[in-house]
Image: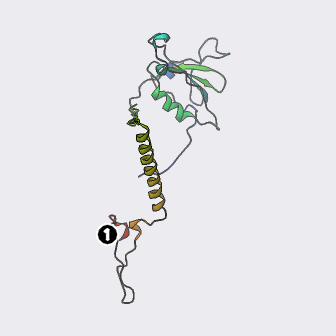
Amino acid sequence: MAAGIAYRIESVIDAIAPGSPAETATLKGKDDAGGSRKLAPGMTIVQAEFILPPPEKKAAETAPEDRLSQPSALKFSDEKPNWPAFHSSVQEMPPGTRFKLTTDDGSTVELEPVAAADWFNPDRGLYLDAEMVEIRAQSFGQAIVMGVREARDSVGQVYRFLRHLGRKSPCAVWVDRSPSPSKPARRPRKDCRSCCCF
């Protein structure tokens, strides 16, 4: 049973997973010449940038539709709570993708995502296109026939839709189980297949 509860996911670090790349990564900033600062709970992430891996083929050998475009950076704030969008984008990036996080003090850190052992991604990455069949008329007369048939089918769909507007559902019929002599019992409609009307 769904509770229908929605909540905002903030971009504030709650904890660092032991043994993760975030535990060993060091922050880079104006005041981090020695490179000793690390990510810690309480830090706020304000931006995330994706760093795509180099293409395996040369640019001239890769078809334009197969080339990955550089994703735009995602900003995080109270007005732009984009952390769920960032999490979803990480699942769709090719292997080897890194991302650069920027904290609220301007420091940056580059990380590479790793597979989570306690979380399952339900999206299998299958993008199925609808089956389409292109039919071309071979003559002017056939084109007229096909146009009339298409117009008839479209008008019929609109008519059937408008015809059903305002009609009561079959399961909305009320049945009186205790009829009186002056008030005969009403029977449920035969096309009602749900118990909601009894």
The image quarter containing residue 11 is: top right
Q: Horizontal placement of 172 versus 29: left or right?
A: left
The residue labelled by disc 1 is: 190
Quadrant where the image shows the C terminus = bottom left
Whether residue 119 appears in this view of the structure is no
The image quarter containing residue 133 is: top left
Q: Nearer the viewer, residue 14 or 124?
A: 124
Question: Which residue corresponds to the image point at 45% horizontal and 18% vertical from the top-left?
Answer: 96
Mark 1 element type: loop
- Residue 97 picture location, percent across and down: 48, 20
Question: Which residue corresponds to the image point at 41% horizontal and 36% vertical from the top-left?
Answer: 139
- Residue 103 picture location, percent across and down: 62, 25
Q: Nearer the viewer, residue 6 or 172?
A: 172
Question: Which residue corresponds to the image point at 53% horizontal and 34% vertical from the top-left?
Answer: 85
Outermost residue, bottom direction? 181
The residue under label 1 is which amino acid type?
Lys
